[in-house]
Amino acid sequence: MPRVVAVLLKSMKWLVISVLVLLALAAGWTGYVVASFDTTTLPPRHGQVDVVLEAPDGAPRPLIVGLGGAEGGNGWQRKRWTKQRQRFIDQGYAFLSLGYFGLPNTPEKLDRIALDGVSRAIREAQATPNVADDCVILIGGSKGAELALALASHDASIDAVVALAPSDTVFPAHTDAMTTASWSLDGEPLPFAPMPWAATWDLLRGDIGAVMERILAQPEADAARLPVERIRGPVLLVSSNRDEMWPAQRMAERMMARLDAAKFAHAHEHLAVEGSHTAVVDHFDAVEDFLARRVATLPQCSGTTASAP
């Protein structure tokens, strides 16, 4: 029996040593990745986006711009969104599906995506005869919601925002190093809440929600809050109460409080729903209703034939 115990103890000793060596190697590699990442040079194809415009013949239509999330690609062109895009078109809107990373003609990663590049693509779409030049509505989900709110906070030509599972903070880029901002303007990164070393283990075990909580808990997060009070039109926030990716409901409530404190002059609503991160996409009936009540009634957007469901 003592021999068996000795063998077990020896095995456990080598197991512990092996784990410590692996952790040291992982820490060393992570440190190398962070230290060697180029935080000054903008990524290839910076400012380029992928767009698909659907604007039926006839009178100029208000423009909805659909922004996907961290999955990359041109999310609103996926088959699952065909029906919803058509519903918006049937209600009198033109629809611009816009992909901003993960495509051959865009940056590879979600890293310092150019807000001005997105604005430029919207202006180009508005130059189309069938698209109105004075009414732009952004609809974004998750990271696309963060992008929509960031863009509308800096671009006065945006008339309304619908943010599904939103963020009120600029998070780090989706690179291996995570040492740059998700968004940039005029070639300069927006202030962002950095990735703390304490979140490394959460990241390695795939607990994204815990990573986001650690990022938000840092003092630097306050300076990375989006100035949503600068938005020039109605805002709808839709969040779920069991969001496992980030605390969208808490961030939405914080944005509502910020807008109220600033005496925001435009309609702003927060719809809190039951479910996980993706549950918000089950509530496009509320989105359509908001557009009919709060956006289609704006003087510059009154060309739409949308009506409340």
Image: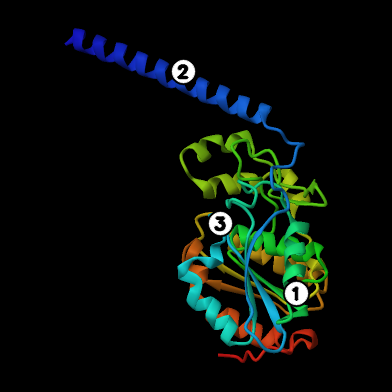
Local packing at callout 1 (Cα closer than 10 Å; few below 14, some 14-19, many 20+) is many
- Give whichever of discs 2 and 3 has the lower sequence position: 2
Mark 1 or mark 3: name the one nearer the start of the chain: 3
Left-right relation of 25 to 180? left
Q: Element type at marker 3?
A: loop
Q: Name the residue under label 1.
A: 126
Work out how far the residue at label 1 is from the one at label 3, CA to CA, in angstroms.
Answer: 22 Å
- Amino acid type at circle 2 is Val
SS state under label 2: helix
Question: Residue at 51% across / 70% down in the picture?
Answer: 281
Helix, strand or loop under label 1: helix
Nearer to the camera, 296 or 165:
296
Q: In this view, does 148 lie above or below 289?
A: above
Name the residue tied to disc 3.
73
Disc number at residue 68?
none
Mark 3 neighbour class, 10 Å CA radius: few under 14, some 14 to 19, many 20 or more: many
Circle 1 or circle 3, nearest the eye: 1
Q: Do the residues labelled 2 and 1 touch (CB within 8 Å)?
A: no
Q: Position of residue 250 (x, y in %)?
A: 62, 61
Q: Is residue 83 visible?
A: yes
**Residue 79 x, y percent position in the rendering:** 46, 68
Few, some or many residues within 10 Å of mark 2 (<14, 14–19, 20+): few
- Please state which of residues 129 and 205 is positioned toward the viewer in this rendering: 129
User: Does 260 appear above or below 222?
Assistant: below
Q: What residue type is labelled 3?
A: Gly
Which mark sits nearer the N-terminus, 2 or 1?
Answer: 2
Q: Which residue is labeled 2 in the image?
A: 21
What residue sits 81% from the left and 73% below the top?
232
Q: Locate residue 19: give its quadrant.
A: top left
Rendered-image quadrant of the C terminus: bottom right
Alpha carbon separation for disc pair 2 and 1: 58 Å
